[in-house]
Amino acid sequence: MDGRTKFIFVTGGVVSSIGKGITASSLGRLLKSRGLKVFMQKFDPYINVDAGTMSPRQHGEVFVTEDGGETDLDLGHYERFIDENLTKLSNITAGKIYLEVIDKERRGDYLGATIQVIPHITDAIKDKMEKAAEESDADIVIVEIGGTVGDIESLPFIEAIRQWRHDAGRANTLYIHSTLVPYLKAAKELKSKPTQHSIKELKSLGIHPDILVLRTERALDEDVKNKISLFSDVDKGAVIEARDEEIIYEAVISLKEQGLDRLVCRHFGYPDKEADIEEWTGLVERIKNTKQEVRIAVVGKYVATKDAYISLAEALRHAGFHHRVKTTLDFISTDEVDEKSLAARLAGVQGIVVPGGFGSRGAEAKILACRYARERNIPLLAICYGMHMMVAEYARNVLGLEGAASCEVDPKTPHPVIHLPPEQKEKTDLGGTLRIGRHDMLLAEGSLAREIYDGARSIGERHRHRYKLNDNYTEALIEAGLQISARNTADDVAEIVELKGHPFYLGVQYHPEYASRPNRAHPLFAAFLKKALLQE
Ligand code: GLN
């Protein structure tokens, strides 16, 4: 390591889901607003090689990077906050590290040495951090360690970041520990004990935190701060509070007010200048002051899981920020509706989104949603699997092809309007075999799609799928009014379909939601919401 790149390590204690990803991303935004180049990395201690095969029910959404990484959803927060495209190097699991080390061992690269957690696994982890610094050329890399300190799986990662300070020096590393300070209603008191224990645990692993970020639902009084500062031996000024925020993007402002970025920059010896977050404060003000509402239904399979559609929900909100309206989302579970109840739920919504998905469950409800939107002229945005259902619906009900379906849903369908391309058929593994990441496409002249993308001839978007439109049916579909408004430049896959004469009926093979940013709504969502706003 050349020492130019500084590293900030963010660990978590007490319980998971206390928003250390938001803390890390907010800090990233603050440092970027000081003119520093920031890159972010998340180490996940689970044994899965990547997040690709993990169930959204258990783990929330899989976020996809431009270069085709299937990653933890925290990467979505990182990209949305720091407004930079991250890469596969930004999300490393224990599984990936072990797999690499074992592969090397099998190849004989270690020349007969005994392979151990220290140094082989820890070296492999440090190697990923070094690569992140090298490839991003960042001034600062923020590394978040998933899970909570004390978990068995995270030990090698904690050890690797401990060694990093030993190797790179104190001036080039900073440790932030994020914990929960619970409020006990019965005692009417904030409790610092779990935090004290967690810091003790961290210290027993050789890491002394420089900054504490304490998640709390109530303001931390001076007593609590003093106590935590005393017991943990962290300066009182470095004990920062992270309150529950109504709008997550507000965290940036509150952390700045408490001087988090100042503390970090002083530690690294950067000049003391103010972070320019005017655009960000403007954004938060705008969000707070919107009155008009737009009601959008999302008809999906995993709606009961809070984070399964997080990028989609954020993208729809961002489009709201753009138009200065509040996007109200009505998540409708495909498991709980039939034709009648779905129509009742959809009555009164101004736009419908049919999101991506895998497997056969929920297909029919999605097809019904597409039909409802088509027949009643309600704006529809159908994404990936949603687009597949949109095409199947059109084939069935407009072309009269009974039983038309995606082969994923009905492998024996007489009309496989969506199918598996031959090169995909040979792949039997579920992990790492998708058509994934950024692919470029040409937008057809005169199409709504091209208008939405500001007249651009070609664009690139992120993908995550196996199945695609079967071109044996395109002629018939086009004749019946469903246009193909974009095709891939390399493999000619149909990327966008749209219905002429409908206010907004658009299906995309890719996932625009991953590229949306709070301060830069994705054009597709912005255009969709604009049309939705015209609905009564
Ligand atoms: N399951 C479909 C496919 O693999 C769609 C995937 C998705 O919606 N992301 O093609």
Image: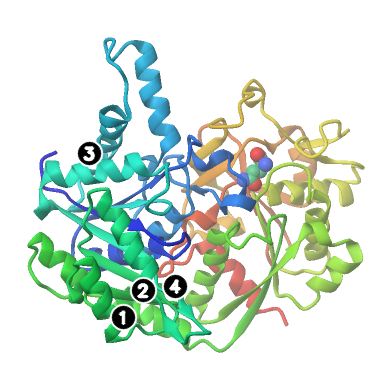
Is residue 398 or residue 228 the one in the foreground? Answer: 228
Amino acid carrying mark 3 in the image:
Glu
Q: Nearer the viewer, mark 4 or mark 1?
A: 1
Q: Quadrant of the C terminus?
A: bottom right
Q: CA distance from mark 4 to mark 3?
A: 31 Å
Beta carbon of the mark 4 residue lies under 8 A of ligand 1: no
Residue wearing tag 1: 224
Of labels 4 and 1, earlier in sequence is: 1
Residue designated by label 4: 248
Closer to the eye: label 1 or 3? 1
Looking at the image, which residue is at 49% across and 70% down? 318
Determine which quarter of the picture holds residue 109.
top left
Q: Cβ–Cβ below 8 Å for labels 3 and 2?
A: no
Alpha carbon separation for disc pair 4 and 1: 25 Å
Residue 191 circle label: none
Residue 418 screen position, x and y as percent: 74, 38
| Tags 4 and 1 touching, CB below 8 Å | no
**What element does badge 3 sit on?**
helix
- Above or below: residue 267 compared with residue 247: above
Amino acid type, callout 1: Val
Read off the residue under disc 2: 192
Please say if the residues under marks 1 and 2 sit with CB atoms less than 8 Å apart: yes
As measured in the structure, the alpha-carbon distance from the residue carrying label 3 to the one carrying label 2 is 36 Å
